[in-house]
Amino acid sequence: MSCSLCGSLACDSFFATNRHFFRCGDCGLVFVNSAEHISPLQELERYNHHNNSLQNQGYEKYLRHCFEVFASNWQRGESLLDFGSGKDGPLGKIAAALGFSCTSYDLFYQNDPMLLAKSFDGIFCLETCEHFRDPWQEFSLLHSMLKPGGAIAIRTEFLPLDFANWFYHRDPTHICFYSEATFSWLAKSLGFEILLCHAPFVLLKKI
Ligand SMILES: [Zn+2]
C-alpha cells in the first residue's frame, strides 16, 4: 500500500469499518484504500442530495464564516477561485456581495478546464481536499494555479484522537484525512509558507 499523497510505502493499517483506512508513516495522511473508493457516479449522486445552497441558512452562515476567516488576505479586485464549489457556487455569491470576485470550479458541476490553466491570487478549497482521489496531483495543480505570493485557503476536519467515533470518516466520499503534520509535509514539499494551520482552517502561501 503506497500513500496517496507522498507515495511512501511506510503505510500501516489504521482502522477498518466497511472500508480500510491506512496511515502514512512519512506524511501522516490517513486514507482509504483506493479499491474501496466509490465510483464518480455514486459520488455525484451523494452530492446531488447535499443541501448546499444559500436557501439553506445554516449553510450560508457556515460559508460566510469560512470566507471571513480568510478574506483579509486579499484585496477586492484580486482574482479568487473556489475550487470544489458545489452545484450553485454559493461562495462566489457571498464573495460578490462583499465586493470580491470569486470564480467557481467544480469537477462535477462547474467543470471548465480552461479555468485550470489560469492563475489566481487566492484559491478556496473548502471541504474539498478530503474528497481528493489523488491529493498529490490536486495540491500540485492548486500550487501551479497560484500567482507567486498567492495562497490556498483550506477547510477540512483534522484527524481527531478518537477516530473510531468520528463522524467525518463515515461519509463514503471522504477518503483523505489530514493533520498539522500532513500540511507541514505538503508545505515543505510543494513550496508553501504556512500562514495558518489551526483546525479546521489552513492557509498556505506560495513561496
Ligand atoms: Zn504519505
Image (cartoon, rainbow, N blue to C red):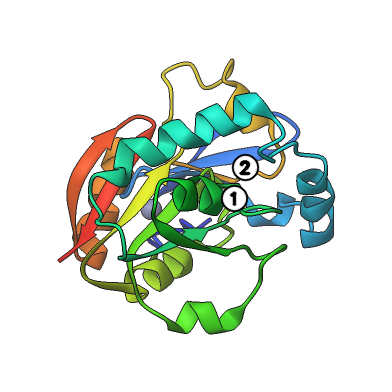
Q: At 60% across and 46% down in the image, what residue appears?
A: 175
Is residue 193 in view? Answer: yes
Q: Is tag 2's residue or tag 1's residue first in the polypeptide sequence?
A: 1
Q: Which one is in front, 155 or 54?
A: 54
Dot 1: few (<14), some (14–19), or many (≥20) neighbours within 10 Å? some
Disc 2 is placed on an element classified as loop
Whether residue 66 sits left or right of residue 174 in the image: it is left
Whether residue 195 sits left or right of residue 201 in the image: it is left
Q: At 23% across and 50% down in the image, what residue appears?
A: 73
Q: Amino acid at mark 2?
A: His
Disc 1 is placed on an element classified as helix
Q: Whole-percent x and y of residue 19?
A: 70, 38
Is residue 9 in view? Answer: no
Dot 2: few (<14), some (14–19), or many (≥20) neighbours within 10 Å? many
Q: For mark 2, what is the residue?
A: 174
* Position above or below: 188 against 54: below
Q: Which one is in front, 101 or 27?
A: 101
Q: Whole-percent x and y of residue 119?
A: 36, 77
Q: Whole-percent x and y of residue 169?
A: 61, 31
Q: Quadrant of residue 35?
A: bottom right
* Position above or below: 139 against 130: below
Q: For mark 1, what is the residue?
A: 131
- Decide if ligand 1 comes within 8 Å of the CB at mark 1: no
Q: Whole-percent x and y of residue 207?
A: 15, 66
